[in-house]
Image: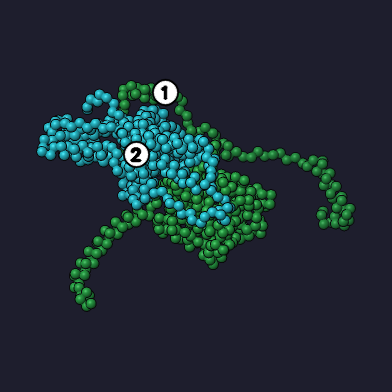
């Protein structure tokens, strides 16, 4: 034992230096490799956001979905890549004290409905069949492009569902249910047709974990707001609107997402810690056994944002000028262009004049006879009722 | 260089072996790869002549035709992912048609009055390239000009060269804010390739793109797999001398198209060939595409189509096998028969080397199988609430690998 510790000083120094240099070389190599593994294989992002409830007292489910929609848009996924399914009966509901708004924070801090919401499936179109058709792609040819999920084998898809659920099923619009087996089969069909690269499934309902129990296709990660046998609770009622505005799990997920910007390096393990039992009352769960990469290597923006992979273009092609015939036609085009009147863009509108116009002064007219007569009548009635002694308080 | 009397059939290759001391090739070069499916290999007088010449021919043939990595790239989504190679992610998937959109982005029309002869450039440079590629699908080309379209990222000022730059980390965030204004995806169901030419505003001119090491990129352009490319076009500082704004800017379409066509090649997966040592590679013809590169693309596409069609038919069979009694409409059945026949025909044609007909048959196979699989009248889900009570518990069916 003593022998191992009796290395002479220069030798130890030499060994240390060698180890350091070797370590730095290895570290840079490992860093390159780590960068490789960190990167997912996707080139585009899609999001399917579903709110399965209707009726005024399910306001919070619509607010949930719209808040996730806002975050996903903020982080870069364009509307053309988002399929939003809502009953959409909140903003214009006769019971809404603030029409055309849906709030997600009490005291009406944040209107998540806004001006540029694009709802793809609204009202009675939100059915189990339409949802499964969107996922599997078995859509009638007349369906417009905005209602399709045109993902390919390099798409990362985020699927968020919220509503009322139970052990193994999720209610759609109070009239039908989707079971966890149907959902698992739909995902399997998507996998067989390579309609996704990786899929993140988030569900905020009662007994939400039961919905991801049956998944068996690869590359799926799932999060739920509560375990089997537990209820997911709502967050805060707003006394002015009269309903609960959001559910707890989604509320804390959104607080978490507010910290994320498109360049964030936050990973999935942080998302799993969101909403512990002390805040959520229910126990959020997650499932990562079907996922190939380690969750700590998966960036939040891999699913919630749309960060493109770019490469610098280093090559060019040599284009020859072409034959003489083509050159002469090129010159003709040039002459035609110069003969045309050049259109100037900047001064077409006298914008300065329009903006700085002063409002016209309206002439003042004295009040007409009708108004005078009305006031005289009011004053007469007043004095008749309360007696003339009050006149000294007025004049 | 050589007189080619007859058109070479697609998928074929002709190799000429010349004498050892012939002056046809430069003295130190052993072989030459031409643009039109021909190659020249230098012979040798040696005991092992046949072996050596044979090896050289094999090297040339591998550079010009189908090899394992081309096949691997074509079948990338059916193979287990253990390599994260960028080459495999880049090419567009095989499709019946493609839409190519050229957009000119002018964020500062008060300073720059930009004119680009896009119609002429498309006619002169892009159309010949697309005609050469026409066997791979239908192409449609659009163009547009967008005013007041900014990049989403603020460029930084580099005082050393008194210019602005965007470094590699900012590039991924450039595309998203612009994309919603492009409007290209609303039009067709074919995949869309966007090529953007950005003329930076006067306050941020000149603008260069820097690579990882901080050096400005020669082409001043970058591309994104399966999306398209962006090139930054700096206005020559001499044109500002007149000091009357807006300055008329005439875009040099040759320079622009050289970059865009190179990006188009990369996005289609036409990689630079792996040239064997001591080999002279002729430049591409004026179209920008050598005919044997097209052959490689068609081979890769045929294999990819066959894999897709086979997978689709298999999963359709699995889906229908789970339902014991189902009524299938006649046209779905006929599509399935047609798909199977097309797959067989394509495989036969590939085996006998008839590339053109094999590719057409493989496209037919994919179309028919997709039509059968995605028929809207097939049941979407196999069981409803009954599942909770009656369906068997085991759901882990065997997956296709």
Return the mark for residue B300. Answer: 2
Residue ID at (46%, 25%): A341
Crowdedness near tag 2: few (<14), some (14–19) or many (≥20) residues, C-alpha within 10 Å: many
Task: Tell me which colouring the rendered structure shows.
Answer: by chain
**Mark 1 vs mark 2: same chain?**
no
Q: Nearer the viewer, mark 1 or mark 2?
A: 2
Return the mark for residue A336. Answer: 1
Residue B341 left/right relative to B295: right
SS class, disc 2:
helix
Residue B209 left/right relative to A343: left
Shown in green, the chain is A
Q: Quadrant of residue A351?
A: top right
Q: Is residue B241 visible?
A: no
Q: Is residue A77 above or below residue A106?
A: above
Residue farthest to the bottom, as pictured: A2
Residue A41 left/right relative to A110: left
Q: Position of residue B160 (x, y in %)?
A: 32, 48
Q: Is residue A288 above or below residue B139?
A: below
Q: Quadrant of residue B265?
A: top left
């Amino acid at each position: 034992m003593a022998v191992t510790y009796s290395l002479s000083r220069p030798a130890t120094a030499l060994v240390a230096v060698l180890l350091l240099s070797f370590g730095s070389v290895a570290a840079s190599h490992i860093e390159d490799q780590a960068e490789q593994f960190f990167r997912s294989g996707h080139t585009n992002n899609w999001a399917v956001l579903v709110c399965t409830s209707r009726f005024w007292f399910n306001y919070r489910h619509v607010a949930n979905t719209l808040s996730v929609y806002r975050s996903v848009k903020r982080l870069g996924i364009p509307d053309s890549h988002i399929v939003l399914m809502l009953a959409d009966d909140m903003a214009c509901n006769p019971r809404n004290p603030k029409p055309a708004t849906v709030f997600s924070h009490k005291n009406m801090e944040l209107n998540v409905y806004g001006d540029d919401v694009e709802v793809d499936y609204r009202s009675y179109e939100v059915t189990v069949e339409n949802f499964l058709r969107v996922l599997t792609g078995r859509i009638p040819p007349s369906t417009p492009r905005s209602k399709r999920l045109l993902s390919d084998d390099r798409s990362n898809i985020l699927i968020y569902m919220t509503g009322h659920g139970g052990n193994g099923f999720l209610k759609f619009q109070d009239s039908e249910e989707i079971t966890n087996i149907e959902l698992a089969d739909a995902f399997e069909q998507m996998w067989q047709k390579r309609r996704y690269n990786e899929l993140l499934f988030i569900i905020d309902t009662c007994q939400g974990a039961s919905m991801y129990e049956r998944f068996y296709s690869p590359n799926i990660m799932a999060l739920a707001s509560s375990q089997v046998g537990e209820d997911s609770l709502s967050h805060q009622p707003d006394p002015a609107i009269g309903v609960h505005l959001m559910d707890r799990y989604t509320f804390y997920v959104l607080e978490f997402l507010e910290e994320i910007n498109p360049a964030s390096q936050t990973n999935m393990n942080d998302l799993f810690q969101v909403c512990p039992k002390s805040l959520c009352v229910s126990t959020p769960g997650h499932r990562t056994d079907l996922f190939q990469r380690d969750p700590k290597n998966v960036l939040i923006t891999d699913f919630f944002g749309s960060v493109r992979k770019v490469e610098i273009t280093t090559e060019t092609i040599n284009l020859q000028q072409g034959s003489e015939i083509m050159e002469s036609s090129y010159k003709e085009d040039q002459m035609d262009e110069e003969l045309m009147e050049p259109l100037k863009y900047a001064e077409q509108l006298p914008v300065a004049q329009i903006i700085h116009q002063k409002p016209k002064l309206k002439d003042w007219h004295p009040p007409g006879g009708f108004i005078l007569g009305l006031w005289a009548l009011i004053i007469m009635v007043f004095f008749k009722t309360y007696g003339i002694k009050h006149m000294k308080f007025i004049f | 260089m050589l007189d080619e009397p007859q058109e070479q059939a697609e998928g074929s290759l002709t190799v000429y072996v010349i004498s050892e001391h012939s002056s046809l090739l430069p003295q130190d070069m052993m072989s030459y790869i031409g643009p039109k499916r021909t190659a020249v290999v230098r012979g040798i007088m040696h005991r092992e002549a046949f072996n050596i010449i044979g090896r050289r021919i094999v090297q040339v043939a591998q550079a010009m035709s189908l090899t394992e990595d081309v096949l691997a790239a074509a079948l990338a989504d059916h193979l287990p992912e253990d390599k994260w190679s960028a080459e495999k992610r880049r090419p567009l998937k095989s499709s019946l048609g493609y839409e190519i959109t050229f957009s000119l982005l002018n964020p500062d029309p008060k300073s720059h009055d930009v004119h680009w002869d896009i119609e002429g450039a498309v006619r002169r440079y892009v159309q010949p390239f697309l005609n050469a590629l026409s066997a791979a699908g239908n192409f449609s080309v659009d163009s547009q000009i967008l005013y007041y379209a900014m990049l989403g990222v603020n460029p930084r000022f580099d005082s050393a060269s008194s210019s602005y730059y965007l470094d590699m980390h900012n590039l991924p965030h450039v595309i998203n804010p612009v994309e919603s204004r492009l409007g290209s995806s609303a039009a067709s169901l074919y995949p869309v390739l966007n090529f953007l030419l950005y003329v930076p505003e006067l306050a941020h001119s000149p603008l260069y793109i820097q690579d990882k090491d901080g050096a400005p990129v020669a082409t001043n352009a970058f591309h994104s797999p399966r999306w398209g490319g962006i090139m930054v076009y700096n206005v020559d500082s001499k044109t500002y001398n007149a000091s009357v704004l807006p300055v008329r800017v005439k875009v040099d379409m040759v320079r622009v198209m050289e970059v865009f066509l190179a990006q188009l090649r990369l996005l289609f997966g036409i990689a630079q060939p792996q040239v064997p040592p001591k080999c002279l590679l002729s430049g591409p013809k004026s179209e920008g595409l050598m005919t044997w590169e097209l052959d490689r693309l068609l081979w890769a596409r045929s294999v990819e189509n066959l894999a897709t069609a086979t997978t689709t038919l298999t999963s359709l069979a699995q889906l229908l096998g789970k339902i014991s009694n189902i009524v299938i409409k006649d046209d779905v059945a006929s599509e399935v028969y047609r798909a199977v026949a097309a797959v067989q025909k394509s495989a036969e044609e590939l085996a006998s080397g008839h590339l053109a007909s094999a590719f057409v048959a493989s496209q037919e196979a994919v179309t028919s199988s997709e039509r059968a699989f995605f028929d809207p009248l097939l049941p979407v889900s196999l069981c409803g609430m009954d599942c909770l009570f009656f369906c068997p518990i085991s759901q882990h069916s065997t997956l296709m690998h």
